[in-house]
Image (cartoon, helix red, strand yellow):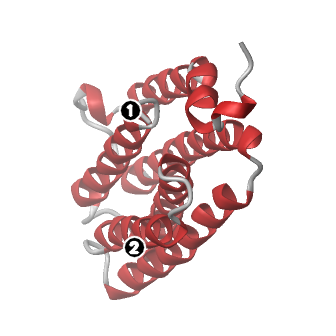
Amino acid sequence: MQGLVPLVLIYLLLAAWIISTVYQYRQSLSGMAGMTAAMALGMGIGLGLGSLIAAWIPGQFALATALGMGAGAIAGALTGAPVGMMAVLDGLLSGVMAGMMGAMLTEMMPPGDVALTVQWMVVLYSVIIFIIFLMLHQAAHTGKRVASQAFWQRPVTLFLVVVIVILFTLQHDLNLTRELLPPSVHTH
């Protein structure tokens, strides 16, 4: 399942980007902004990786569920940690719940629909990441003059990364479909 490995790496890279942004802006963020970021990232990672892992290792529902839940819980807790225990708990719980739902979603899909589901999860996750980044950026800079920022701290940079991720995902449709479908369903 080589086609899914880059998608998992993209998920983790975008999650690290958001977590580092929360740590960078932790002094300027309100509790509500931190909780929202923790819940949204925990949910995005849990739902996305739960569905990707279930597609990656079909028939291993318990393992995919556990990995999706664990990844979502860790991402949510790490994102909420600089804000406080309530944000940690919100992120952790949303990651656990979404990890179960992501694995169930992919496991319940007919084999021919799994590739499309994986694509939509990546697109949805990428858009969520961009919105979280904009929210964090706005919450940290409300009423303040923004000093010159590094290239990776600008919203336009993440927007370009999200567009590239979406285009990459949509372009790899046939590769995913061939990998995820049983041999009897392939069309030549």
Residue at 32%, 41% in the rendered image: 13
- Tag in front: 2 or 1: 1
Q: What element carries label 1?
A: helix
Residue 86 showing in the rendered view: yes
Residue 73 got which mark? 2
Outermost residue, top direction?
188
The residues bearing labels 2 and 1 have C-alpha atoms spaced at a distance of 21 Å
Q: What element carries label 2?
A: helix
Residue at 22%, 30% in the rendered image: 150
Residue 49 in picture, x, y percent from top left: 47, 54
Q: Where 136 sits versus 99, above or below? A: above
Kind of residue at badge 2 = Ala
Residue 10 in picture, x, y percent from top left: 39, 37
Q: Where 87 sits versus 129, above or below? A: below
Q: Quadrant of the C terminus?
A: top right
Give the quadrant of residue 19. Answer: bottom left
Residue 143 showing in the rendered view: no
Kind of residue at badge 1 = Pro
Residue 76 in picture, x, y percent from top left: 39, 69
Locate residue 63 relative to residue 108 in the image: left or right. Answer: left
Q: 29 or 36, which is in the foreground?
A: 36
Residue 6 got which mark? 1
Residue at 36%, 50% in the rendered image: 15
Of labels 2 and 1, earlier in sequence is: 1
Locate residue 137 relative to residue 172 in the image: left or right. Answer: left
